[in-house]
Image (cartoon, helix red, strand yellow):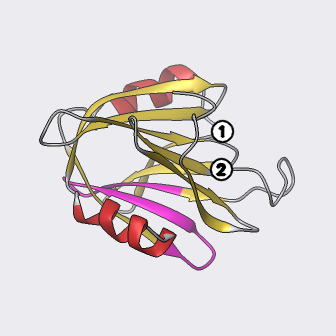
């Protein structure tokens, strides 16, 4: 399966129910979602700047203290991830129900163009990674982190 096919197949399984959101490492964020058949998918926002928004108002950002953004992200639990869109300049936007979105921007002052902004791990099947320099890539090997 080609990457465009894999990405299209992934987008077709949306919406996905959010079951957990937590700080991952520093300002990295782990979003755990589940498919209707119970299969887990881990979405990790990694080496990037991010903003959590509701109706275009910023609720939290990667510059906030962990305690603040932990509380704001908890509001996503029980809702659904309904789309992921690649924008010019804003890199990626994860769109949730209830007017919420999670916008990921590259930060070339802290990270490299080859660093991963996001990884999407579909348990036991594949991992999709996004870097500013290479775009979307797929991995079928053992993922580096779960």
Membership of 78 in magenta stretch: no
Where residue 9 sits, quadrant-wise, is: bottom left
Pointers 1 and 2 in contact (C-beta within 8 Å)? yes
Determine which residue is flagged by label 1.
Answer: 63
Please state the horizontal and vertical placement of residue 88, each as a whole percent of the image: 59, 80
Report helix, strand or loop for mark 2: strand
Q: CA distance from mark 1 to mark 2?
A: 8 Å
Q: Residue furthest left?
A: 36
Q: Residues within 10 Å of mark 1 (few under 14, many from 20)?
A: few
Q: Residue furthest top?
A: 67
Rendered view: 49 above or below 64: below
Nearer to us of marks 1 and 2 is: 2
Rendered view: 91 above or below 45: below
Direction from residue 119 to residue 82 in the image, left or right: left
Give the residues drawn in magenta, as a range. Answer: 86-103
Membership of 100 in magenta stretch: yes
Residue 24, numbered circle: none
Q: Please identify the dominant SS of the magenta region.
A: strand
Residue 49, numbered circle: 2
Rendered view: 119 above or below 70: below
Q: Quadrant of the N terminus?
A: bottom left
Residue for point 39% across, 25% down: 71
Please state the horizontal and vertical placement of residue 4, each as a whole percent of the image: 46, 74
Q: Residues within 10 Å of mark 2 (few under 14, many from 20)?
A: many
Which of disc 2 and disc 1 is earlier in sequence? 2
Viewer-side residue, 109 vs 139: 139
Viewer-side residue, 31 vs 119: 119
Please state the horizontal and vertical placement of residue 70, each as a whole percent of the image: 45, 25
């Amino acid at each position: 399966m080609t990457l465009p096919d894999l990405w299209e197949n992934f987008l077709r399984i949306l919406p996905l129910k959010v079951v957990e959101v937590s700080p991952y490492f520093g300002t990295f964020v782990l979003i755990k979602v589940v498919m209707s058949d119970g299969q887990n998918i881990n979405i990790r926002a990694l080496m990037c700047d991010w903003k959590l928004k509701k109706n275009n108002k910023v609720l939290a950002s990667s510059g906030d203290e962990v305690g603040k953004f932990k509380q704001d992200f908890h509001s996503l639990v029980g809702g659904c991830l309904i789309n992921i869109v690649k924008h010019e300049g804003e890199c990626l936007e994860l769109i949730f129900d209830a007017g919420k979105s999670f916008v990921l921007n590259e930060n070339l002052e802290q990270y490299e163009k080859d660093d991963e902004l996001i990884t999407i791990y579909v348990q036991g099947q594949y991992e999709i990674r996004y870097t500013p320099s290479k775009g979307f890539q797929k991995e079928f090997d053992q993922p580096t982190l779960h």
